[in-house]
Image: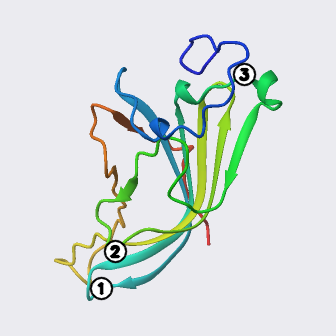
Amino acid sequence: IACDGSEIPLGKLSTLDLPALRDAPMDRAPVPFKVGMHITELNEINERNSSFRFEGFGDFQFCDPRSAFDPIAVGRKSQRIVGVREDYPVWDVKLHVANGIGAVEVTQRLVEIQYDGNIQITGYFSAVASAFDLRLFPFDRQALTIYLESFNYDNRLVELVTSDELVKVSKN
């Protein structure tokens, strides 16, 4: 049974090399895209240009039944792709930091595709964001906010989902 409840035809080989899988699934409701972040470093706080640098691990999970495969025919229950590349054979919602300055730098990435079509993308990143309100400085407190959004798709195709258990900040 695929992650959406449909049957996986026996003998179906993996279709992970098809370019069409990199396109959004247009035939269903918005895809819930679970977004998790574990911030490990917060540094380079710059009051002058109202920015801060943060680093950490991103964890993104979603279901794409088009990536489901017969684990008996393939010989394993999951497929892993390691490395930072742009040609992954899975759909990518292209998340970016909406209040970012410059591009997000991804230095490590792991894509794991389960036989039922569940996909998890994990990676290490660093980015710079802008989010200060210094009107009351130096008698203020700041919430350093990070806004994520899909660069390619709106809420008709992607529903970003977060929860307290998916978002963490290192004690250091």
Q: Position of residue 150 (x, y in %)?
A: 34, 48
Q: Nearer the viewer, mark 1 or mark 2?
A: 2
Marked residue nearer the N-terminal end (1 or 2): 1
Residue at mark 1 to residue at mark 2: CA–CA distance: 17 Å
Q: Nearer the viewer, mark 2 or mark 3?
A: 3
For the residue labelled by badge 3, is the local secondary structure a helix, a strand or a loop?
loop
Tell me the residue at 31%/52% (across/down): 151
Residue at mark 2 to residue at mark 3: CA–CA distance: 41 Å
Q: Position of residue 123 (x, y in %)?
A: 59, 58
The three-letter amino acid code for the residue at tag 2 is Gly
Residue 60 sits above or below residue 75 on the image: below
Q: Foreground: 32 or 5?
A: 5
Q: Foreground: 140 or 25?
A: 25
Name the residue beneath numbered marker 3: 70
Few, some or many residues within 10 Å of mark 1 (<14, 14–19, 20+)? few
Give the label on residue 47, or none. Answer: 1
Give the label on residue 102, or none. Answer: 2
